[in-house]
Every structure is written in C-alpha cells, then in structure tokens.
Image: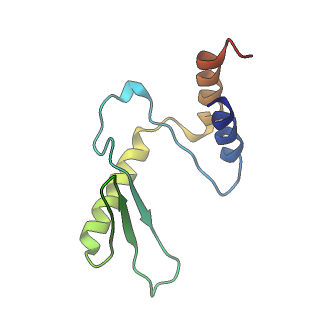
Amino acid sequence: MLAQIERLKAISEHPRVTLRLIPFSVGAYPGMGAAFTVLEFRDTNLEDLVYLENADRDSIIREDQAEVERYTRRFADLCELTAPTEEFANVVDKIAALRFSDRQ
C-alpha cells in the first residue's frame, strides 16, 4: 500500500492530472460509495456522457442530457468538499507517516 500512496503522489505532480481527497472530517456525503465517471468531449458532435459501474453491471447515460448534467453537478459538489489540490502531496505524506511509520 505504501508504494500505491507514493505512486499517487508522483501522478499528482503531472501537469494534466488533478487528484483530490475528501477528508474524513466531511463525514457522509452524497454519492458516497457510488462510482461514476463524467466524460466531456471537445468535439461538439459528441455529447457528454456518464459511465456508471457497480458490482452487478455497468451502464452509460448519453441520451438523457439532463441526467448527465445532474452527475456533472454532483461532481462539482464533490469537488467543493475536497481538500485544496495544492495540499494533496502533504496530505498523502501525512497518511503515509501515520500508516507506515514503522517501515520508514
């Protein structure tokens, strides 16, 4: 797990990648435990879509753009709950120090 944490920290330094953490202090939040991906396309001929995946099946929402917009808003709301992105590396370092202090 320590290698995974270190890898996430390295990935977070890439200029085209943004990783965010929702602190435990936020508590339960809407959408907790429900994974979704919003895909937005530069090509105006392609409509944005939402990809949903769970243990039973996966699905794509494309035809219902109101539903796509609902997930887009949910994503924006989740981003508001996250720790500042510039603190990602520090937070990851703190997690690693707490979890793996006996290995360092």
> Residue at position x 44%, y 35% from top?
22
User: What is the basis of the colouring in this image?
Assistant: rainbow
> Residue at position x 28%, y 74% from top?
65
Q: Is residue 79 shown above or below 91?
A: below
Residue 70 lies in what quarter of the image?
bottom left
Q: Is residue 81 shown above or below 17?
A: above
Asked whether, in this view, residue 2 is left or right of residue 40, the answer is right
Q: Nearer the viewer, residue 69 or 96?
A: 96
Q: Residue furthest top?
A: 102
Asked whether, in this view, residue 67 is left or right of residue 45, the answer is left
Residue 75 locus on image (x, y percent): 38, 53
Q: How many tags in the picture? A: 0
Q: Is residue 3 shown above or below 44?
A: above
Q: Residue furthest bottom?
A: 45
Residue 104 locus on image (x, y percent): 74, 16
Q: Residue furthest right?
A: 104
Asked whether, in this view, residue 13 is left or right of residue 65, the answer is right
> Residue at position x 37%, y 51% from top?
35
Residue 51 locus on image (x, y percent): 38, 65
Q: Nearer the viewer, residue 33 or 74?
A: 33
> Residue at position x 38%, y 45% from top?
78
Residue 62 locus on image (x, y percent): 33, 76
Q: Where, quadrant-wise, is the N terminus in this rendering?
A: top right
Residue 101 lies in what quarter of the image?
top right
